Amino acid sequence: MVEESSAGYVLFTQAKTCVGCRTCEAFCAYHRYGENNPARALLHVLKFDNLSVDIPVVCQHCGEAPCIAACSIGAISRDPRTGAVVIDQNACLQCRACVPACPFGAITIDPTTNLISKCDLCGGDPICARVCPKHAIMFTKRSVGPRVLMRAANEQLAQSVEQSYRSRVKPPA
Amino acid sequence: MPRITIIRGREDHLRELGRLFGWAGKTLRVDLTRGDCFTQDTPENLLRDFLGGAGINAKILYDEVGPNVDPFDPENLLIFGAGPLTGTIAPSGSRFCVTAKGPFTFAFCDSNSGGHFGPELRFAGYDHLVFIGKSSKPTYLWIDDSSTELRDASHLWGKDVWETEEIVKEEVGDADVKIAAIGPAGENLVRYAAIINDHSRAAGWGGMGAVMGSKMLKAIAVRGTKGIQVARPEEFERFCIKAKDMVLKSPKPKTVGIYGKPWLNWLRNEVQKSNPTKNYKLPRVPPDEFKKVGLEAFMDLVVKWKGCFNCQLDCSHILQSKRGPYAGLMTEGFEYNQQIDGQMMGTYDLNFVLKWTAETNRLGVDCDGPAYAIAWAMELYENNMITKEGLDGIELTWGNQQACLEMLGKICKRNGNSFEYLLGEGIDLASRKFGKGSEKFAYHVKGGRLEIDPRTGWATALAHATSTRGADHLKGMPLSNAFGVWKKIPYEFTDDSKPEHKAEAVIFFEHLNTVTDSIGLCKNDTWSQSAECPGLVEFAEMLSALTGKDYTADSLLRIGERIYNVERAYNSRCGLNRSHDSFQEKFFSEPIETKMGVLDRETFEKLKTEYYMLRGWEPSTGHPTAKKLRELGLDSVAEDLKIRRVIS
């Protein structure tokens, strides 16, 4: 998953690498609110335990953001410096039209303040990417991100190709 | 017997001085007989003197469950305890402890688990849950922040853990709730039944699942949205990030971080040459078979890694069996223990180990308990002391995987014959009941199965003999060089062939591990298992910034000592003494190829005496002395033991 930023950096996630530890959630909430409370995090790891799958879900800061379109009062806009889609709480009516508009469900309602909340890329240096132990969330140059995914997807192929090379070697007599 | 005792000792209600930071400061008391819950302020003296988690659990057990209570009586408590760091950004702040009078120790017992349940309990605003009584019908507890409800679980009774989780999530309308549940094993009071949380994490030791089942408590579901407040937020964040980086820079990410605990199977089999196999008939997996269960075989199963709340190490895995009878099975797994289980039953097949892991999680039972019982039964079968007819047609030969799985089902569901029922009682009770000399090859200490050969070394032997909850490496076995760092002396924990300094080392690790279990961090990525990981100094830094109180490495160790003395005192009160800190004859007479070879009885007893004396305990009995207890501020415990004539 890839999203645009005018700073040339993208925040993207890899469900295949995610270990479900939720360090991202813990630090997101702490960094923003100064308390230990992942329920307030702006991103979420969806756990599907019986499928053995963990999926990190975060705002994609879409190029054509449905949440911006859904907001009738213009409270959501793009931060030109970071490229992040951000909510202006002073303007926000708390009408929640943006919540179902997001195709990822990435807009949340903070359980403590009841305010509509979303990821703002921590002002340009997202903490989730810094603390993820497995780099399942990465904040990296736009062109680098997809290459990382490409490499991961083709690792098995690389191993089979190597095997085919080795099978040509004749054992010593 | 009063349901809620008055906590003896000075109760400082310092709330007028300010808020409580770090601790939620609340204990949820659930009376299952009456069907009600109430929230109690955790007494300030417990927070001050016992930290939390395992520590406060132990003191509550001491104060409220006397020696005449049977583990399955309604008067036994089932206590869940998270630490002040559980649920925080402290690395591996995921742990919680479950404590009760143990169904196979008949004395103190506790079990620790990771995952996400402990943190969620804390986010709901509780540090501890204390269950007493017995519900008249199956029930589950639903905690939704401050709202608590005991719900009917009659439709869940008999279902396995995974089915139960799905139904409960559906009923409460939220797939993100965290659940701790028992399966058929707990319901049927199998003495080593487990409590499974977050699908595949376990409070596996000690039969806590059976205590839960005896109370007709099927599950606990929790959702929490409250924060854990911090006294000095910036300082706390700094110390937590520093600790996090220590974990990443330590050797752990390259060993256990990749291979998981199976890395230990390799270390013990190939380096230390001691790895229980075929009910200890073999000292380790034979070299020609080890390839089937070694690191390469393990990595072949790995789909990806898996981690507990806020962990940097993430030592667990999602494994998939690719071939054989269990091909396609994919689930979280496994620890070193499951590998020992496979080996104990004479199998050398990691696909089977994965199947065993899945089944034991699903059925809600400790992985080791049934494996050791079956291994013991296999030895009986080999010696014709039990026959195929006596096992309803099951051929319990070494390595018969099908037989193992069938027997596992019968043990947990208790739908087999009387011998199969007996296996669910644990090898201590089973061997004593069965008799005919079978006690000789039931390897346990205080009823708890022995999973590391004491002939590995002196600290190993001493730690397993003295563990307060029965044979177990996680109370006191030195698994890192932290002792050397602490004492500023050269120390290599794998060099365990001489008894010198081992008593002191074991005592240090008992206190260190108790502290770790009380604050809510994991032993895998802290001093307990790597001297390069965060240790007592870092714990003190994080705790001080979190709570606003002043902790030091020394003051933490002191609290660890206090807690361990409470656990030991509990055991003394239950009738355990020096003679129970020992092993079966085999370990004293049959040498294996470790440096130590065999446990020399005289040296072992001398080592125990040294241990008791260093601890300030009475060497002839192994009981804590009144002097030591008072020194630790445990005057009420000293008086209690004196009144009962346990000590003088």
Image (cartoon, grey):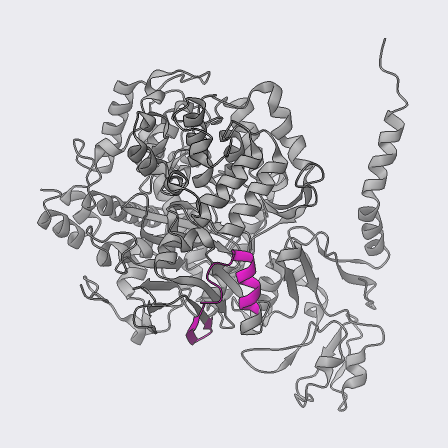
* Quarter where residue B262 is shown: top right
Quarter of the rendering containing residue B212: bottom left
User: In this rendering, is residue A100 above or below B428?
Assistant: below
* Observer-nearest of B305 and A7: B305
Residue A122 % position (x, y): 68, 68
Q: Residue furthest front?
A: B389
- In the displayed structure, B281 sits above or below A46; it is above
Quarter placement of the N terminus of chain B = bottom left
Relative placement, left or right, of B278 versus A39 is left
Is residue B294 covered in magenta?
no
Whole-percent x, y for residue A95 in the image: 68, 89
Residue furthest out toward the top: A173
Is residue B182 visible in the rendered image? The answer is yes
- Residues B349 and A47: in front is B349
Tag count? 0
Place of residue B538 in the rendered image (x, y in percent of width and height, measured from the top left): 46, 49
Which residue corresponds to the image point at 44% horizontal and 71% vertical from the top-left? B152
Residue B94 seen in the current view: no
Q: Residues in magenta?
A: B143-169
**Residue B471 vs residue A156: left or right?**
left
**Is residue B48 depicted above or below B280 in this figure?**
below
User: Percent position (x, y) of residue B400?
Assistant: 56, 31
Q: Quadrant of the C terminus of chain B?
A: top left
